[in-house]
Amino acid sequence: MRLRHIAAWIILAFTVADAQTIEYSKFFADNRLRVDYYHTGTKTEEMFSLEQVYEEPSFAGSRTNLVDTLNLGLYQVRVYDAATNQLIYTHGFASIFGEWKTTDEAALKIRRTFSESVLIPCPKRPIQLAIAVRDHWNRFVEKWSTYVDPSSRFVSRTPHGKNIPVTMWLKNGDPATHVDLVMLAEGYTEKEMEKFRKDADRLLKALFSTSPFKEMKSNFNVTLVETPSQESGINRPRENVWVNTALETTFNFFDLPRYVLTAENRRLRDDLARIPYDAVIILLNTPYYGGGGIYNLYSIACADNQWSSYVFVHEFGHCFGGLGDEYYASTTPYNDAYPAGIEPWEPNITALLSPPDVKWRDLVAPGTPVPTPADSSKYPFPTVGAFEGAGYAAKGLYRPAIDCIMISRTQTQFDPVCARALRNVIEDLSR
Ligand SMILES: [Zn+2]
């Protein structure tokens, strides 16, 4: 046990030392590099191949916090200075492929491919860009690496996204020291943009009335991106409803009725090419219940359902904080989303492999037993403990509190562990 703590301390010490010694202006320019690649495989195979590198204006991320200490996500992009092999940038993320590989289709060895992008500060010198993947024990292992010379004429400078109207909903300052959210219209025709602005305003007000966003609103910039759709509404394959929209967002993703995603990564990235952003929200012009959220990819929510505010905040919790679902009674298409005996990387779900060492132990009040009985009279919200039932499993996985936005539609607050995880990301992007 003690050895493990010492090892963890040494890793942390090295990470912090790295973060402190990387001087942004020595290695990076103000703009950003977008690296598009294909992520291909099955349940057991995983391959990457380079598609195109783009230079785009303004990198929005932190300039002092270049090596990611949050340790979130299923994947991590790593940037090495090619001349010295020094690690100069890392950032965690998750992806549609990462979810798809746990489905039946992937288990049948049907090989599929998804387009993905990583955004990094534009290096001044050639780099080696690597993607690390979590192994069975949730340790990052590099699976793919490619050389990128930022001065090459093969890096595209195509000025995408030039004619899309944008409005600032909230402006607090420099993108480098603020959290930059962008919200895109999806399924809104050009004539419906006034509705988009009203819907966006209503749902952003719901987000910023929820802690910790409420108290930290001055850390944010929010830009509305009026991506026009040719037709109104959203694809619903189970009802054979097909709509020509800006981002080809689709209900029934993985054949799940309420799950909404878009696999049109390139369209999304092109539309955002001229805007600084840390997190992406896609707002759906639909009354049907649904949404989706993937860490550092995007969050999606329906605008006109009675539960829209809830869906909007819940999905943003996935996308922004890397929070896991705490519910366990609904059906999902995922097999072995959380393998037995492995501690999940999500900050709000634990396998409780060693109850006294539960990862949020500093928030557990003395006298609260761990695991914690699901007795709301003795341990009411927001008491922190370890309550069994989380991550789509009734047994073997635990959540921090009896209730939370990440488990039930009737709860309007994040539990203290989720709230802290979200605060950590806000602080990380504000430095
Ligand atoms: Zn969820």
Image: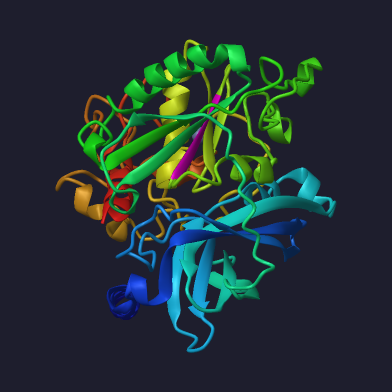
Q: Main secondary structure of the magenta part?
A: strand
Residue found 50% across the figure and 86% down from its top: 85
Q: How many circles with numbers are drawn on the protein? A: 0
The residue positioned farthest toward the bottom in the image shown? 84
Q: In the image, residue 225 lies at what x, y percent?
A: 50, 31
Work out whether residue 287 can be spotted. Answer: no
Q: Which quadrant would residue 136 be assigned to in this image?
A: bottom right
Q: In the image, residue 164 lies at what x, y percent?
A: 56, 32
Left or right: where 4 falls relative to 396: left
The colour scheme used here is rainbow
Residue found 49% across the figure and 55% down from its top: 73
Taking depth in this image into account, of 6 and 299 the one nearest to the observer is 299
Taking depth in this image into account, of 262 and 3 the one nearest to the observer is 262
Taking depth in this image into account, of 182 and 313 the one nearest to the observer is 182
Q: In the image, residue 69 lies at what x, y percent?
A: 35, 64
Above or below — where is 279 with respect to 6? Answer: above
Q: In the image, residue 99 lies at what x, y percent?
A: 64, 47
Residue found 64% across the figure and 52% down from its top: 158
Work out whether residue 321 can be spotted. Answer: yes
Q: Which residues are magenta?
A: 279-283
Residue found 64% across the figure and 34% down from its top: 261
Quarter of the picture containing the C terminus is bottom left
Residue 280, magenta (yes or no) = yes
Taking depth in this image into account, of 117 and 226 the one nearest to the observer is 226
Above or below — where is 124 with respect to 413? Answer: below
Left or right: where 217 falls relative to 58: left
Quarter of the picture containing the N terminus is bottom left
Residue 58, magenta (yes or no) = no
